[in-house]
């Protein structure tokens, strides 16, 4: 019989103590897709709903300040 494995649930990094700021370009780039510059969804970033909204706002600030491009 095939054994089924349960996928380990991701822990929100921001709840664990890590902060995301629009000036930290390397961290922001991990939350944005490479192809079209879209903000990655919660299931990929592993953030809770509250912090995913915070990530989206920080990405938008970084785009406005021209730290990251809107599209590639």
Image: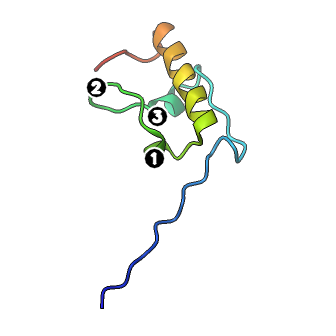
Image quadrant for the N terminus?
bottom left
Q: Residues within 10 Å of mark 2 (few under 14, many from 20)?
A: few
Between 2 and 66, the residue placed more toward the observer is: 2
Q: Residues within 10 Å of mark 3 (few under 14, many from 20)?
A: many
- Residue that badge 1 annotates: 43
Question: What residue is at 57 percent from the left and 28 percent from the top?
Answer: 53
Check disc 1 and report its element: helix, strand or loop.
helix
State the CA–CA distance, disc 2 to disc 3. Answer: 12 Å
Q: Position of residue 70 (x, y in %)?
A: 36, 15
State the CA–CA distance, disc 1 to disc 2. Answer: 18 Å
For marks 1 and 3, the one nearer the N-term is: 3
Q: Position of residue 48 (x, y in %)?
A: 59, 42
- Residue that badge 2 annotates: 36
Location of residue 33 (image quadrant): top left
Between tags 1 and 2, which lies in front? 1
- Residue that badge 3 annotates: 31
Check disc 2 and report its element: helix, strand or loop.
loop
Q: Position of residue 12 (x, y in %)?
A: 61, 47
For marks 2 and 3, the one nearer the N-term is: 3
Q: Is residue 3 above or below residue 62?
A: below
Q: Position of residue 55 (x, y in %)?
A: 56, 29
Q: Residues within 10 Å of mark 1 (few under 14, many from 20)?
A: few
State the CA–CA distance, disc 1 to disc 3. Answer: 11 Å
């Amino acid at each position: 019989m095939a054994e089924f494995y349960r996928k380990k649930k991701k822990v929100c990094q921001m709840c664990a103590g890590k902060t995301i700021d629009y000036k930290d370009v390397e961290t922001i780039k991990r939350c944005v897709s490479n192809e079209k510059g879209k903000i990655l969804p919660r299931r990929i970033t592993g953030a809770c709903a509250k912090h995913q909204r915070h990530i989206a706002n920080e990405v938008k600030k970084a785009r406005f300040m021209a730290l990251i491009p809107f599209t590639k």
